[in-house]
Amino acid sequence: MDGGNVTLVTEFILLGIPLTYDFQVLLFVILSICYAITLVGNATIIVVSLSDAQLHTPMYFFLSNLAFLDISFTSAIVPKVLFNLISGSKAISYYGCLAQSYIYFLLGTTEFLLLAMMSFDRYVAICHPLRYGTIMKPKLCLKMIFCSWLGGFMDTIAQTILTFRLPFCGSNVINHYFCDVAPLLKLACGDTHIISMLDFILASSLVLGSLFFSLVSYGCIISAIVKISSAFGRRKTFSTCASHLTVVFIVYGSCIFMCVRPSKNSKVDSTKIVALLNSIVTPLLNPFIYSFRNKIFKEALKRTIIIKPTSRAKSFKPS
């Protein structure tokens, strides 16, 4: 290609979801409310878990990290969408687009691994309750969190570097409301075959691998629940397990639809709704599914609001 006739891209245009002005205003209001609830809900989990000594357990340690991930994950996408809706500008800088793409997939893959770690925590708590305190020690919990972040970083860094080195010229319109990899690669002037295959292989191995681990853990949990003699105990434990499985199926189902399919060049518009579910709805629902339905957390929330804790435990307690 003749370099003299090429105009390099310095910014991208996020096409988003074409709507009339009235519907754009409505969408702005809805997304603003959802984003505010997401921030408040997840921040509440973090604050209460840190403030109340009775929540200094591995389960709430993982939930606090999940809440932090959800805040970061949705904040990587929603503020830019809201700005574009209210301002009418759909532009995003070249480096801003690449940064948004990397952060989105880094946090997304980290969340998959964290959900797998949380499934293991619940497996130990329900299937081996007498050994829970000796297995889920603070050092192990920290290692599990570190491995989740490290796995997310290693899974996304190679693809990001290769994408960063691609030349972008000609059209700069991305058929999405954020810098997703699939529509971004369609604008590249160079060969994207290797990046697409690497993306598919890494997404398939990490997503399906962590999903398999989670399903095996919950399978063992359900098997243990069936053996509980008390009907009330079975219902209570299964209710919690079902709520957690709901999050797993929403998160993994949407990701498999978007990322693991071999062909991502067709029906890009259909992935926008699924991506919306994954980046906005799931972080919104997680606090209500994991914590706000929990009696222990609700009591801790009342104590945090009414009485300021005077001391904090420095170690985890068995859940």
Image (cartoon, rainbow, N blue to C red):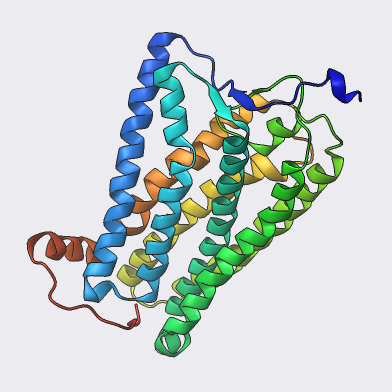
Q: Is residue 157 left or right of residue 288?
A: right
Residue at 44% across, 49% down: 72
Q: Residue furthest right?
A: 1
Percent coordinates x, y for residue 192 in the rendering: 83, 38
Q: Is residue 314 above or below residue 189?
A: below
Quadrant of the rendering where the C terminus is positioned: bottom left
Residue at 39% across, 63% down: 63
Q: Is residue 78 above or below residue 160?
A: above
Q: Is residue 124 above or below residue 116?
A: below
- Pick the residue in front: 256 or 217: 256
Can you see residue 293? Answer: no
Q: Quadrant of residue 179?
A: top right
Q: Is residue 119 left or right of residue 132?
A: right
Can you see residue 161? Answer: yes
Percent coordinates x, y for residue 196 in the rendering: 79, 42
Quadrant of the rendering where the N terminus is positioned: top right
- Pick the residue in front: 212 or 303: 303
Percent coordinates x, y for residue 116 in the rendering: 55, 65
Q: Is residue 161 left or right of residue 140?
A: right
Q: Residue furthest front?
A: 4
Q: Quadrant of residue 132?
A: bottom left
Percent coordinates x, y for residue 39 in the rendering: 33, 46
Q: Is residue 308 left or right of residue 254?
A: left
Residue at 86% across, 21% down: 4
Residue at 42% across, 34% down: 79
User: What is the tally of numbered marks visible in this picture?
Assistant: 0
